[in-house]
Amino acid sequence: MNETVFGVRGEGKTWYLIDKIKSSPLPCIVIDTLRDPKDNYDKYAIRIYEPMILKFDMFKIVYTPETPVDFAAFCYHCARMRNYRLIIDEVDFWSSNKKVPKELLNLYRYSRHYHIDIYASCRNPYEIHRQLRGNTNTFVIYRLTEEGYLKYFEFFRKGIMSEIRSLPLHKNIRLDI
């Protein structure tokens, strides 16, 4: 299963992902893109600094790639493992609407075959590549205000724009595709 979480800053995207780590019966790999300033992920996972030590069984680990090359190499290693959750905070940092690393795209495309659940966060639907959005099973939407972003979700369910606008702080809507 692939889920992408959307919302503006401070709405609860990171805490949603942390709940996925805490509730996971599977090992977790967390890509903490911008290194959460409060090190929230470090409370629930073991931080590693070298992606080569990805031999784990029931550990929950967190890694912050420094460059796009580091990120691609990390995704390459992730594709060699099976049965885990991959959590990518701020996936738009690595994938724009114009490009996506082939290693990340392959993880999304073949996650079912790899037995990987991917959970990613992003601020709006247009900041990540259309192929990643297209390989997502569920959108979790926190409060968004930009009209263009709201219209993207309206395509999937009529009337959702007003539902999103009226969401209270830290509440979300699940949109199964």
Image: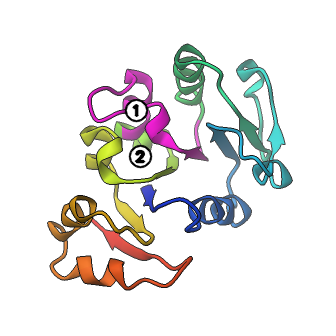
Q: Residue 112 location, x and y as percent? A: 41, 46
Horizontal side of residue 1 vs 17, given as left or right: left
Residue 104 part of the magenta segment: yes
Residue for point 43% across, 72% down: 143
Q: Gap between marks 1 and 2, in whole Å?
A: 21 Å
Horizontal side of residue 73 vs 165, given as left or right: right
Residue 97 part of the magenta segment: yes
Q: Residue 169 location, x and y as percent? A: 54, 79
Instruction: Sort mark 1 into few (<14), some (14-19) or many (20+) by Cα contacts within 10 Å.
Output: some
Q: Is label 2 in a helix, a strand or a loop?
A: helix
Q: Which residue is mark 1?
A: 95
Quadrant of res 31: top right
Q: Which residue is mark 2?
A: 112
Q: Quadrant of the N terminus?
A: bottom left
Magenta part of the chain: 82-108
Establish if 81 lies above or below 42: above
